[in-house]
Image (cartoon, rainbow, N blue to C red):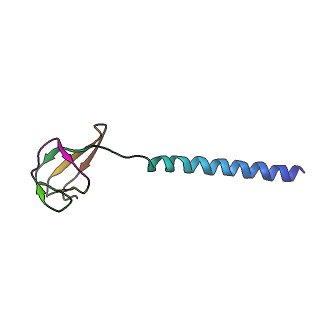
Amino acid sequence: MKAKAKRILTLLLVLTMALSLVEPALAADDASGSTLRLSTAEGSVTVKDASGKEKTVRDDMRLYNGYTVETGKSSSAYITIDDSKAVKLDSLGK
């Protein structure tokens, strides 16, 4: 009886540990941004809309679904997400 109880306890412990590893991964899927902006462009930066039409680049420019941002040689772009996070696109990035 003791061996069976020990196996059950071990199984419960393993399942608890496995679930504790899965939960943060599931929470990461919920992360999303509702507002993207090209906060700063340095050097040669190109922005295209979803249809591929080139847009005029300016600081604090709103980026919409399907937009692409490309940086040229020795250039960079800073993109803010919901005014709380930022991403830097380095030289020759897309």
Where on the picture, by quarter, is residue 91?
bottom left
Give the extent of the magenta segment.
Answer: 56-65
Count every numbered label the image shows and give the total: 0
Is residue 1 rendered to the left or right of residue 58?
Answer: right
Horizontal and vertical percent for residue 57? Answer: 11, 49
Horizontal and vertical percent for residue 29? Answer: 45, 50
Residue at the farthest right position = 1
Residue at 68% of width from left, 51% of height from top? 14
Where on the picture, by quarter, is residue 81?
top left
Is residue 52 rendered to the left or right of residue 82?
Answer: left
Q: Nearer the viewer, residue 72 or 25?
A: 25
Is residue 93 rendered to the left or right of residue 54?
Answer: right
Horizontal and vertical percent for residue 54? Answer: 11, 58
Residue at 22% of width from left, 53% of height from top? 90
Residue at 14% of width from left, 47% of height from top? 41
Q: Nearer the viewer, residue 59 or 87?
A: 59
Q: Quadrant of the C terminus?
A: bottom left
